[in-house]
Image: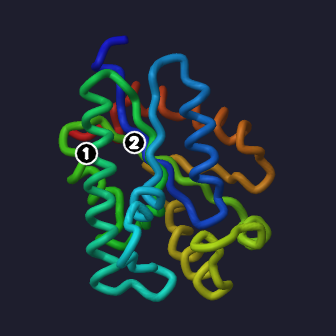
Amino acid sequence: MSHQHAFTLVITGPAGAGKSATAEAWAQAQSHPTAHVSLDTVREFLCAGYADPRDGWTPEVDRQYQIARSLCADIARRYVSEGITCVIDDAVFPLWDRIDFTSWRRVLGETPAYLIALLPSYETVVERNASRHGRRLLEPPLLRTIYDMMLPWREQRETPTIDTSSLSISETADEIARVPAHLRQTEKFGVR
């Protein structure tokens, strides 16, 4: 495979949108080498001193998030330089400059990068959250806040959004498979 065709795909959406499972399914369905990196998993490499975002966005939570994002970007850049596409799942917010896609572009440097937002209905998010455990289970007020902060993606014409309310993981991965080719064709979201 030519290295020039490898890229980084960032999948975002609220908790319960299916980011991690869909990213994994999409990566496994590719016909060329593709890696999946979950920012939450990288954050949880910390065995002691983990700053939990559920307790509020403190300076330490922010610091650990910035470290994890930089590590994910390092991994993605290395994979792409070797001709391997990389899909990263992360909660990227459209109007929060510390955690927006511009910040991802900055840490990814010249690596081609694209963003897709998964936005199911709030009822779907609540239902999916109920089956989570541990750090992945969110209290209703936080779940609602995150969901509401993701809604502006629908108004960002340059960001493809997929309503995953009635889609299975494989169906969502199929929908995503149709988007990157169009993005690469127009180079609308490529890092220049």
* SS category of the residue bearing label 1: helix
Q: CA distance from mark 1 to mark 2?
A: 16 Å
Q: Is residue 66 left or right of residue 28?
A: left
Is 123 situated left or right of 75 in this image? right
The quadrant of the image that shows the C terminus is top left
Q: Against 147, is 31 above or below?
A: above
User: What residue do we see at 32% from left, 12% from top?
Assistant: 2
Q: What element does badge 2 sit on?
A: strand
Q: Amino acid at mark 2?
A: Tyr
Give the camera-side residue of 83 and 190. 83
Please give the residue where the numbered disc 2 appears in the rendered image.
Answer: 114
Residue 9 coordinates in the image, percent (x, y): 43, 40
**Residue that label 1 marks:** 74
Question: In terms of image quadrants, where is residue 26?
Answer: top right
Name of the residue lying farthest toward the top: 1
The front one of 172 and 67 is 67
Which residue is drawn at the image coordinates 35% and 20% (left, top)?
5
Number of other residues with Cα within 10 Å of mark 1, as a class: few under 14, some 14 to 19, many 20 or more: some
24 to 53, vertically: above or below: above
Q: Locate the N terminus and report the quarter of the image it occupies.
A: top left
Q: Which mark is residue 142?
A: none
Task: Give, as a three-letter code, the residue at label 1.
Answer: Asp
